[in-house]
Amino acid sequence: MKVAVFSCKPYDQRTLSKAVAETPSIELSYFESRLSSETMTLTNGFDAVSCFVNDNIDRHVIQYLADHGITAIALRCAGFNNVDLSAAKAANIKVYHVPDYSPTSVAEHAVALIMTLNRKTHRAYHRVKEGNFALEGLLGFNVQSRTVGCIGTGRIGQAFCRIMRGFGCRVLCYDISPNNDLVDIGCEYTDLETLYSDSDILSLHCPLNASTHHLINKNSLSKMKDGVMIINTSRGALVNAQEAIDALYTGKIGYLGLDVYEQENSIFFEDMSSHIIQDSVFQLMLTFPNVVVTGHQGYFTQEALDHIATTTLDNLIAHAEE
Ligand code: NAD
């Protein structure tokens, strides 16, 4: 089976090449460009394509793939939102995905953001590089014994809660369908109001949907402790960025750690640097010393890349054997 792999960065290629060496029935060709109507002719002569979050597999692309003998789209991500699934079904193209490639990676990244902010490590590092070993302004606090709120206790939220329990935190959870395994390790499910009022640190692990859009806003922030730490490794639009900035000015938010932000949109992985420059709200956020931002790297560990590669190949093998 000949597979055209799109949106393939050098690190993806290294990982996939290693994994496919064990699978002689599959031949991979790598393209750094994203699959879209502009690049779809690159799929000529292939049996399947493999895509990532920013490939645009719309009705027009699907029709082209079907007309040129492609029978499978193996996504290297969890979400399907960049694929016209009904068009794929009508064209008899099977779509595969990798449902849970990185719960531990994302959970550990959320914890890393907490541990950076509480000890001001990002600021300390720059000082020391300049030869400044003064501690003034770097006073931290222990995470142990703090109350941590977790909204969304699915795969990632659950991994996060387990780590925070290990730190000796009181862990308050909110989810529309609670998980008894977490109760067994001492986590407490509560209503959102209690989670807001009692948490010193609040980490978001729910999906973005109509009920969670701008969950962190002026109103919810008003119910929280002064100086609360907010961590978002989930989806940017869970936080109203402008209202978060207002809360940073007043001190309502004491610490803000973001791996995702609303403005990243579809150009995620494409040209993030120029986009950041254009976005004034985001620019303003970066000026606060108590804000740490990373560029959607929560999932980005070698373990997650290995899992993505092997699951993608398993999906392609299963397709070939159908
Ligand atoms: P999951 O589906 O396993 O868990 C999500 C949980 O949220 C479920 O338990 C669900 O019941 C709960 N939920 C749904 N609506 C809710 C609501 N209104 N209020 C409270 N809880 C609600 O998902 P997951 O794999 O744990 O992923 C969680 C989030 O992390 C997703 O938004 C995903 O996009 C994001 N993510 C980020 C990265 C990254 O690199 N930063 C990587 C992977 C996933």
Image (cartoon, rainbow, N blue to C red):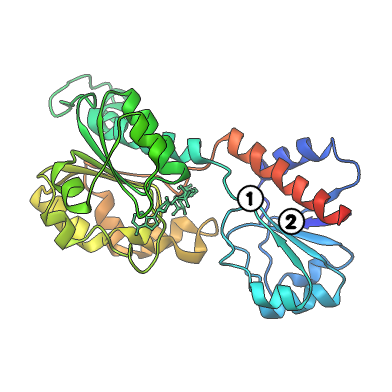
Q: Residue at x 45, y 55 (%)?
A: 273
| Marks 1,2: beta carbons within 8 A | no
Give above or below for 125 relative to 237: above
Name the foreground residue: 224 vs 297. 224
Q: Secondary structure at mark 2?
A: loop
Name the foreground residue: 163 vs 117. 163
Q: Residue 262 placed where, x, y %?
A: 37, 62
Q: Residue at x 81, y 61 (%)?
A: 48
Q: Residue 280 placed where, x, y %?
A: 29, 63
Label 2 sits on what residue type? Phe
Near mark 2 (Cα within 10 A), the count class, few <14, some 14-19 or many ≥20, is some
Number of the label disc, if any, that sits on residue 98: 1
In the picture, measured across the screen, residue 159 lies left or right of residue 24, that is: left
Label 1 sits on what residue type? Val
Quarter of the image for residue 218 reads bottom left
Quadrant in which the N terminus is drawn:
bottom right
Residue designated by label 2: 31
